[in-house]
Image (spheres, rainbow, N blue to C red):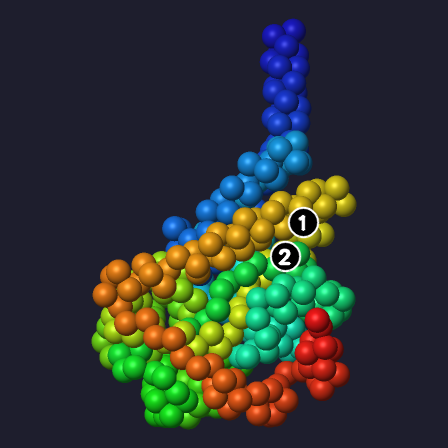
Amino acid sequence: MKNLKQTLIGTVALLAFSGSAAMAETALKWAHVYEPTEPYHTCAVASSDKLKAATDGRYSIEVFPASSLGKEVDINEGLSLGTVDIIYTGQLFAGRAFGPIAIGGAPFMFRDYDHWDKYRNSELFEDLSKGYQDATKNHITSVTYYGERHVTSNVPIDKPENMSGLKIRVPNAPLYMMFPRAVGANPTPIAFAEVYLALQQGTVDAQENPLPTIQAKKFYEVQKHINLTGHITDALLTIVGDPTWQQMDEADRAALGTVLDEAADCATQQIIDKEKSLVQWFKDEGVDVRDVDRGPFREATMKLHNGDDATWDQATYDKLQAIK
């Protein structure tokens, strides 16, 4: 009788454990290469409680900043491997898997912020996202404004000729080399986490990033000039890996999509606000912030838009340029 009682207790305990395990929360891993202080990270962190509430505790999000789960190439690969669930990534990195999606990250591709904003909400972008999904099975859910990219350097840059022979760090994606090549500079791919040291040690003479990133990564400490070239109106894609997507039911996928869109809107607005205030902030820090005539830079670069480096066809280019 005693043995039967012990068996029944054990069975009840096992069933209780199985039930609790079945209801256990799944923490999705969201990886990126940006600093914990940046809006991309803080807005992503805030997503966890929202997702938990929307899925009745089935899912939460754990965010891994500053390349802690790998560099940009690594985390892109991790989506399909299932080692990460969600990432922020640049369009040019996504373009390694599906070339046409990279067009949104090419230099001087957009006339201004409004042109970019209309593109991200366009049928063209939907079609390109579907093409990326067909190529990778991974799912682009959201687009976050990353800011206008500007060149920082230890020599003043006022015209394209000033960049001739300049060794400039670029991310490790081929299209980031289009702008430097157009103006005669020497593009040098270096991982994001290693840029500060490369500038400090003189491995490269310059780099390019939006003002909020220049502040967050403290590049202004090792560069004398910020030259407002505005050569790329850049964005980050939020991508969910297919293994993660397939494990979720339709309602939870919808909840995740909504939460990721809200994170994108949150970070976008903060970046817009920061861009407006940072020129003066850098000047107050003693950095030379230089307005430049972007016309000659744009003219030099547009000659390469549909050249050998283009990963899109003429029809895609024309559709993007026709967006009003």
Q: Name the residue under label 1.
A: 257
- Whether residue 249 can be seen here: no
Q: Relative to 242, does residue 224 appear above or below in the rendering?
A: below
- For label 2, count other residues whose C-alpha is less than 10 Å away and answer few (under 14), some (14-19) or many (20+): many
Residues under numbered marks 2 and 1 in contact, where contact means CB atoms less than 8 Å apart: yes
- Whether residue 284 can be seen here: yes
**Gap in angstroms between the C-alphas marked 2 and 1:** 8 Å
Residue at image coords 56%, 58%: 144
Residue 71, picture quadrant: bottom left
In the displayed orientation, state which residue is furthest to the top: 1
- Disc 1 marks which amino acid? Gly
Residue at image coords 74%, 70%: 124
Of 241 and 298, nearer the camera is 298
134 left or right, relative to 166? right
- For label 1, count other residues whose C-alpha is less than 10 Å away and answer few (under 14), some (14-19) or many (20+): some
Q: What secondary structure is marked by label 1?
A: helix
Task: Say how many tags the image has.
Answer: 2
**Residue 206 placement (x, y as % from top left):** 33, 79
- Disc 2 marks which amino acid? Ser
276 left or right, relative to 281? right
**Residue 283 placement (x, y as % from top left):** 28, 64
Residue at image coords 48%, 69%: 148
* Mark identifier at residue 142: 2
Residue 15, picture quadrant: top right
Q: Relative to 319, does residue 120 appear above or below in the rendering?
A: above
**Residue 181 placement (x, y as % from top left):** 46, 90
Residue at image coords 42%, 70%: 209
Of 8 and 4, nearer the camera is 8
